[in-house]
Amino acid sequence: MRMRLKLKTVFVLYFMVSLFGLLYALMQLGQRCDCRDHEQSKDQQISQLKGELQKLQEHIKTSELSKKTDVPRIYVITPTYARLVQKAELTRLSHTFLHVPQLHWIVVEDAPQQTQLVSDFLSASGLTYTHLNKLTPKERKLQEGDPNWLKPRGAEQRNEGLRWLRWMGSTVHGKEAAALEEAVVYFADDDNTYSLQLFEEMRYTYRVSVWPVGLVGGMKFERPVVEDGKVVRFHTGWRPNRPFPIDMAGFAVSLRLVLTNKEALFDGDAQMGFLESSFLQHLVTMDDLEPKADLCTKVLVWHTRTEKPKMKREEALLKQGMGSDPDVEV
Amino acid sequence: MPKRKDVLALILIVLPWTLLITLWHQRAGNPLLPIPRDNRTGTSKAHQRSFRLQKPCLSENKHIPEVTRMKSIHSRSPAWSNALPTLHIITPTYSRPVQKAELTRLANTLLHVPNLHWLLVEDSAQKTPLVSRLLENSRLNYTHLNVETPPNLKVQRTKFRNARIPRGTMQRNLALRWLRANIGPRLGQSGVVYFADDDNTYSLELFEEMRWTHKASVWPVAFVGGLRYESPKINSQGKVSGWRTVFDPRRPFAIDMAGFAVNLQLILSKPQAYFKLKGVKGGYQESSLLQDLVTLSDLEPKADNCTKVLVWHTRTERPLLVNEGKKGFTDGRVEELLHNTKKKKKRRSFRFMWTKKTDCILLREDLHIHTVFRMPQR
């Protein structure tokens, strides 16, 4: 009897202890953590959080873009040249491009060699890219003090981009070649502003598609005028008699058209404003243009231009031999 | 019978222990809870609760007028984790031709930053549909505010320099107000406040540098003060000892608006700290806020001890809309700008110049007319 009693009490005690332990643990779950002891391992916490942040960022990158692999690819050709704001312009441009699935960025520098700044930038950007360079011959280059409308800029670089595309088109086979059939080529300057919807509009281009461009030609926007689903003329404030009075940012060409018309290039000697026409007239007539952006009623791209930063004090410092550290990349 | 009793007893003993052990296991294995994708609506609802305004905001300070209406929405946020400090980005904006473009590309940048809350404050009497639509269509967490700077206090080219207030001051103050009214100093509500103008350029690393601000952090800014970049001077102890600027380096905080960020709790704990509205000398606006919040020794240098440039003070050219309207000169600003370049020559002589040069006019490059243009033929 004694033994039994003892065992019973033991069991009861055991049960009560475990029950209380369980209740305590459940209560603990509802409480806020007393963070005083966390203070001591703040650095640990920070590195833990940073790790989680990295995980999140990768998650964003991979989940959004990797989903869409079955849409036509967009090849964006951007001519660029070294100046103070170059890195800033490319940075914010890359932020826009990172949102666009199936985008291949072709950056062509106006330089004798590829610069460290652009190479480092592109490799860190997270985009699919091709880095090229082509120097504009001296006689076609703008000199100091020239107004920047005097000579067309970027023609050689865009042609280099086209040359690369044609080379690529002739060397790929199979799946890649099939992908190129539906791809689109767009010429994006590094100082313009692009909305994300623009890329979705241009993605399905059969020949050449067009749309309005904001803040160009001295107007709030320039646009093709559409009647019955076809482009009949262009609403522009300057020289509407050009064959294609449209800005570089206002059209996209299907890669197929570029590859079949191997002679179509930008004419670096063209008169101001005729650069786009020099290229497009080899490819298409006004009848064949495909109007986008709600039959050319929405502005999805703006021809913004960035001011040249004032460097008066920098120049003054340089004279004194105390200029800013040239190792710091700006 | 005894068998049953034994079994019952056994179960009663084992059960709580198994529960205890499983709970302990869970807690030990999962200190931080990552938010899976489908849980997003849950977190955004929680934030809706915390960010939605309960009652209209009353003005206590006579400089800050009453706000009529506020709107705060959390839609499909880019990425959110309950563990990371929130970045509250305050952007004042005003209506001009490039506004939509600037806000579009800024939004494209901000979409890459997790745990971001964008406070966009318009300089207008009412919220404009342009900005409202832009914010709704972006996928950002935002708060849309507005306050109009009284026209007599706006930056003028001439007269009454003391009465002018720097652009964006009232708007930034309103945003600070909103934060103080809507985010109480709760435990664990970690955040950082940053003033981002809509025409600057920000790299993504900048946001991650500022996220870990304890009090106030600083870093170099490019293209300000007439230099390639301005930056704080860091001494051998890793503390800010001065300012590497040419323009008035004796200012208490010789730094641009884009060059510092402040911890949210610090803002909330000092409710009197605002940007000074009147009587602020050029370049002292940032100091007017920071001197109420921190001292020089409290500043935390970021960007590799202030040796990397992660933000550029870019400025967008104002497009001259000369070809709008029939005669091409209905836009009054055109005449104003041309007036300035001709070095105070009168309008009359400009017209004379126009006709003399047979319909063509060449303007200086810095006026960003990059074409030779004729009078449009109508």
Image: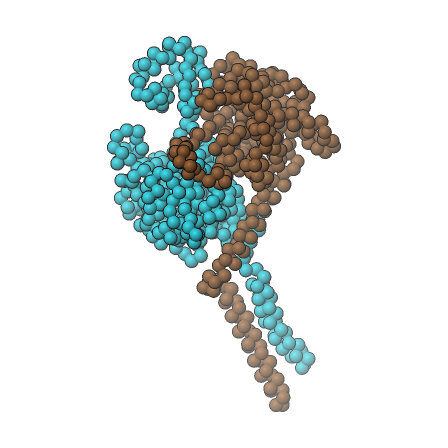
Chain colours: A brown, B cyan
Residue at the right extreme? A174
Q: Nearer the viewer, residue B115 or A329?
A: A329
Q: Quadrant of residue B247?
A: top left
Vertical relation: B15 (above or below) A178: below
The front one of A267 and A115 is: A115
Q: Is residue B372 visible?
A: yes
A194 over B270 or under it: above or below: above
Res. B138 visible in picture: no
Q: Using the image as rendered, state which of residue A242 and residue A272 is in the foreground.
A: A272
Residue at horizontal 38%, vertical 53%? B298
Hey, which quadrant is residue B276 in on the image?
top left
Residue at left 38%, top 37%?
A: B225
Q: Residue at x 58, y 28 (%)?
A: A112
Q: At which x and y percent is residue A298?
A: 50, 27
Task: Say left or right for A224 vs B362.
Answer: right
The residue at the point 63 percent across, 22 percent down is A207
- Determine whether A127 is above or below A222 in the image: below
Q: How many marks?
A: 0
Relative image position of residue B188 (x, y in whole percent): 44, 57
Q: Position of residue B363 (x, y in %)?
A: 41, 19
Quadrant location of the N terminus of chain A in the rendered image: bottom right
Farthest residue, direction bottom? A2
Q: Position of residue B21 (x, y in %)?
A: 60, 68
